[in-house]
Image (spheres, rainbow, N blue to C red):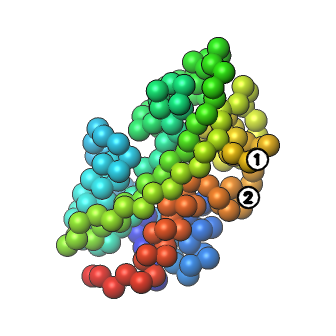
Amino acid sequence: MKITFITGNQHKVKEANGIFDNFGIELEHVDLGYPEIQGNLVDVAQYGAKHVAKRLGKPVIVEDAGIFIKALDWFPGTYSSYVQDTLGNQGILKLMSDVKDRYAEFRSVIGFCTPKTEPEIFLGAVNGCIGYIEKGNYGFAYDPLFTPEGYDKTFGELSITEKNKFSHRRKSLEKFAIWYKDYRGD
């Protein structure tokens, strides 16, 4: 089985390959931009998958993900990539310098679509908290800030293999893979 993953993020490709290997799904990676509409993660994934499937004329998956911080009214959320590029981790730590409630969620949404169907959506989330400093050299973006619930290490301190055992991306990609193995569409 094979699926085309639309992303410009090589870190996501590595994580997806590690997860899909367990399901016998071969990943074709295409770095192709698509419009990201304003809305929630589901809206972005649905629109992106539908747009790219029609554009390429074949089944595709896209992923939209973000970190949602409770004390910041769930910011940066759908703006996670933009905020990472502009404020970075140090900017997030500065925004949270006097915040005691550091609860956060990493969320991932996989959107699958063919040129002839409506998008299917697969959600994954991991609860945890934002630390007071960056820790670790693994992962990317907010990983060195986020400590998942039940762990004493940040995503940035976990190898890709360790992170892939339970990450938000693991959960959404695994839901998709289980569904896709039984998929009989065109």
Find residue 162 and name its label. Answer: 2
- The mark found on residue 132 in the picture is none
Disc 2 marks which amino acid?
A: Glu
Q: Callout 2: few (<14), some (14-19), or many (20+) C-alpha neighbours within 10 Å? A: few
Q: Nearer the viewer, mark 2 or mark 1?
A: 1
Say which residue appears at 45% left-offset and 69% top-offset.
176
Q: Is residue 173 above or below residue 181?
A: above
Q: Are marks 2 and 1 in contact (CB under 8 Å)?
A: no
Q: Quadrant of residue 37?
A: top left
Neighbour tally class for label 1: few under 14, some 14-19, many 20 plus, Cα within 10 Å: few
Up-down: is 164 above or below 97?
Answer: below
Q: Position of residue 115 (x, y in %)?
A: 22, 70
Helix, strand or loop status at disc 2: helix
Q: Amino acid at mark 1?
A: Tyr
Q: Nearer the viewer, residue 53 or 100?
A: 100
C-alpha gap between disc 2 and disc 1: 11 Å
Q: Residue at x 73, y 27 (%)?
A: 133
> Which label was assigned to residue 151?
1
**Rendered image quadrant of residue 31:** bottom left
